[in-house]
Structure formats: structure tokens, C-alpha cells
Image (cartoon, grey):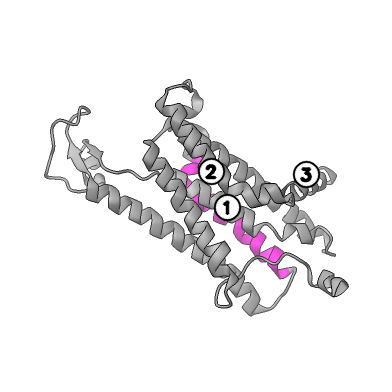
Amino acid sequence: MAAVDVIVDNLVTLWRIPSIRQNFHWIFLLISVVGSVLKELELVPQTYFSSTRNALNVYFVKVSWGWTLLLLTPFLLLSNSSFSRSVSFLCRRLLSLAVATAVWYAFTETFFYIEDATGSCYETDALDVVNKEFVSKASCRRAGFLWDGYDISGHSFILAYSALFIVEETAPMASLRTAKLSALPRVVLNLLYVALNLIVIVWVWMFACTSVYFHDPSHKLLGTICGLIAWYLTYRVWYLKPFSPGLPPQRHPKERKQHA
């Protein structure tokens, strides 16, 4: 497992660079703007990733929140219990998963509602024959027709929000590298940490693919901004307050005593 240890150390070092950690969220806005311009100018050639049937989109992006929770839940439990085994502390930290899931659900459902409220069902690709019998995207598509409404990019939202969420919740790894942990928890933490970083890479890559291949510019920008706002209001505003899940612990209790 020496190779995994080296990878973990390099990743921890990378995320401890202030300029990277503090400006990571701006990457999504930059990619969204640049990608939208490239798409409108048709400067990016069609590739494997320009198809919605590519493997990363089918098996990862379409169930992105499931992957995020599947890997982050055990990491959060194991990493936070290394700081404190207090039931109240662990419950508060686990609440961050519930909050993030509620945020994901609320925004996603809002996007669906907006698309239904602003759209119409068309019988042809030319969008010249309206079928007023169907008043929702789901019913229209089931009938084999085309729905056209204001489609805020759910992919832009969830990929940006998920990546930022993971980066915030994996921050304790910097302190746990110097903590005394038994062999098995250390191995599991390392593997989960590497897997979560790989997921972040996949999310950023697929976010870029969404930006250059799909949706209108305003749809992508609005989805991205919603993801950034959701992250900012939780981790930069609410989680600083007493009555909240709180921020992930950054320094091991033993290290606090040494620095006191």
C-alpha cells in the first residue's frame, strides 16, 4: 500500500496549497463561460464525450449523487470519528450529508418545475406543431413528442456542487495523515480518499464536457451559479454558525494541545 500512501500525500499537499483550495470554485464558472463560448462558435470537434451515451455519463453522471454519497458517507464517518467519538458531534457532521441531499433534491425539483412551467409539447423537431394535450415534459416524452422549455442545466449544477462538497468534507485528511490510526482504518481512509479525488476529477471533466457540448449558455451558467450559491451558503455562511452541522474538523485534538 506504499504507492497509495504516496498518492494520498501528494493529494493532501495539493489541496493544502491556498491558491488552489481558495479558488477551486471559480474553476467551474470559468469552464462554464469558456465552454459556452466554444460551443456557440462550434470550435470543439465532436468526440466520444459529445454523446450522452458515453460510459462516464451513463454510469457516473446520471447517478452522480449516488456515487458522491456512496464514497463520502463512510469517509465522513471514519474521518470524523478519528477526531471525536461523541455521538452528538458525529450526528452533527452526518447532518451535512442530509443537508447536501436536501439541497440537491430542492434544486433539481425546482429545475424540473421551471422546465415544465415554461415549456410546450411539440409534435415535430421543427417546433412548429404544438400539442396542448400534454402539459409536462414527462407526459410529452412518454407520448413520443418533444418538450421545449427553459432547461437549467442540472448536470452543471450537480457536478459543480458535488465536487465542492467532496473537497470540503475531505479536508480533515490533512490532519489525519499525522494522527495515530490503526492499520485497517488507515488503509480504508486512504482508499476512500483516493477514490473521492478520482470522482472529483471525473466530475470536473464531465462538467467541462457539458459546457462545450450541451445546453444553451444561460442554462449552463445558471446551473453553475446555483451550485456555487448552494456551496457558499452552507460552507461559507451557515456552517460557521453554532446551530449547524459545522465545518469538517481541520486539526486533530492532540495537535491542538501541542499548539496551545
Q: Quadrant of residue 73?
A: bottom right
Q: What numbered label is drawn on residue 164? A: 1
Circle 3: element type = helix
Q: Which residue is mark 3?
A: 7
Q: What amino acid does circle 2 point to? A: Phe
| Dot in front, 2 or 1 | 2
Query: Residue at 47% of width from left, 21% of height from top?
Result: 43
Residue located 57% across and 63% down the image? 236
238 in magenta = no
Number of residues whose C-alpha sits closer than 10 Å to that of mark 1, classed few (under 14), some (14–19) or many (20 or more): many
Quadrant where the image shows the C terminus: bottom right
Labels 3 and 2 touching (C-beta < 8 A)? no
| Secondary structure beneath label 2 | helix
- Nearest to N terminus: mark 2 or mark 1: 2
Q: Position of residue 140 (x, y in %)?
A: 21, 42
Crowd band around label 2 with a 10 angstrom C-alpha radius: few (<14), some (14–19), many (20+): many
Q: Which mark is residue 28?
A: 2
Q: Earlier in the sequence, mark 3 or mark 2?
A: 3
Residue nearest the viewer, comparing 186 with 112: 112
Question: What's drawn in magenta, residue-wise?
Answer: 59-81
Could you say which is closer to the camera, residue 174 or residue 69? Answer: 174
